[in-house]
Amino acid sequence: MKLTFAGTGSAFCMAAENFQSNMVLETTPSGNEQPHRLLIDCGSDARHSLRNLGYMPNDFDAVYISHLHSDHIGGLEWMALANYFIFDGHRAKLLAVKELLDPLWEHSLRGGLETSDHGNSQLSSYFDVLPLVAKTGFDWQGLHFDIIPVPHIVTNESTMFSYALFGRGEKKSFFLTTDAIFNPDAHMSLYRKADMIFQDCELGPRHSGVHAHYDELVTLPAEVKAKMWLYHYQAYDKPDAKADGFCGFIEPGQSFDLG
């Protein structure tokens, strides 16, 4: 089983060699010639980043959505229409916590997908929708995922959560933060029990307060940084993460063996 980063950039990254931070989890079960692929988030440049890896929309069995920002869901309209019109109605499973599904349709996808040649449509017209419950997680191809609600944007009026993943395979476990504020008190137990950590990381002079910034992450304990890979960065000059004790910055197209 391997995890490949289709891109490692932030929502606003315009570096020609990079794309938004969406990932492909792939496994080929024993005795099965065809690999199974789970796309983790499907951002607005997914049609380019996936093609860059050699994938088409019908190459995916399932898509997991962590939250509703466009760099994580902006490519779903493309995927839905391409599968319907070009790839013989291929249907992928759409996995997301149930609280996200209504606003995903009503506020992001309905305008482009509701009216079609088969009449008025809904989300289930294009995907096999699997509402998830955060406290129970989900299983995919022998891998169990815990779903971790992590605060992403915190205001006086409300909190926007992203739904991070803690994956447990036969040999390795990993913590994928998705988009989260720096919150070491809440995340430390996950950091310590994970074999690998994939951490979103801001760069640059401005701390937005909605992602962990490199200046904050560098203060983590050495044993945590030693298994932490950094992604979701902007197109600024990168510091020497390895010298600071991290595994490094993930490069676009880089893959990780999850055992």
Image (cartoon, rainbow, N blue to C red):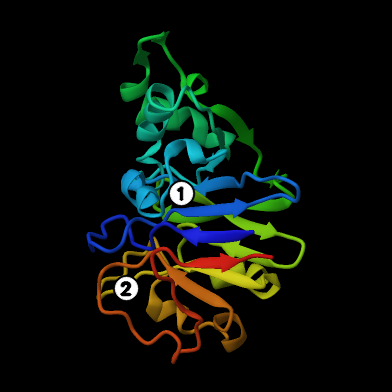
**Quadrant, the N terminus:** bottom right
SS for tag 1? strand
Label 2, on which residue?
203
Marks 1 and 2 close (CB-CB < 8 Å): no
Total labels: the figure holds 2
Q: Is residue 82 above or below residue 146?
A: above
69, 206: nearer the viewer: 69
238, 78: nearer the viewer: 78
Foreground: disc 1 or disc 2: 2
* Crowd tier of the residue under label 1, counting other residues whose Cα lies within 10 Å: few below 14, some 14–19, many 20 or above: few
In the rendering, at what x and y percent does residue 204 appear? 27, 74
Residue type, numbered disc 2: Leu
Image side of residue 151 versus residue 30, left or right: left
Q: Can the viewer see residue 148?
A: no
In the rendering, at what x and y percent does residue 46 appear? 36, 46
* Crowd tier of the residue under label 2, counting other residues whose Cα lies within 10 Å: few below 14, some 14–19, many 20 or above: many
Residue at 36% x, 31% y is: 77
In the rendering, at what x and y percent does residue 115 appear? 34, 13
Image side of residue 217 versus residue 3, left or right: left
Residue at 23% x, 61% y is: 16
Q: Is residue 118 above or below residue 233?
A: above
48, 98: nearer the viewer: 48
**Quadrant, the C terminus:** bottom right
Label 1, on which residue?
159
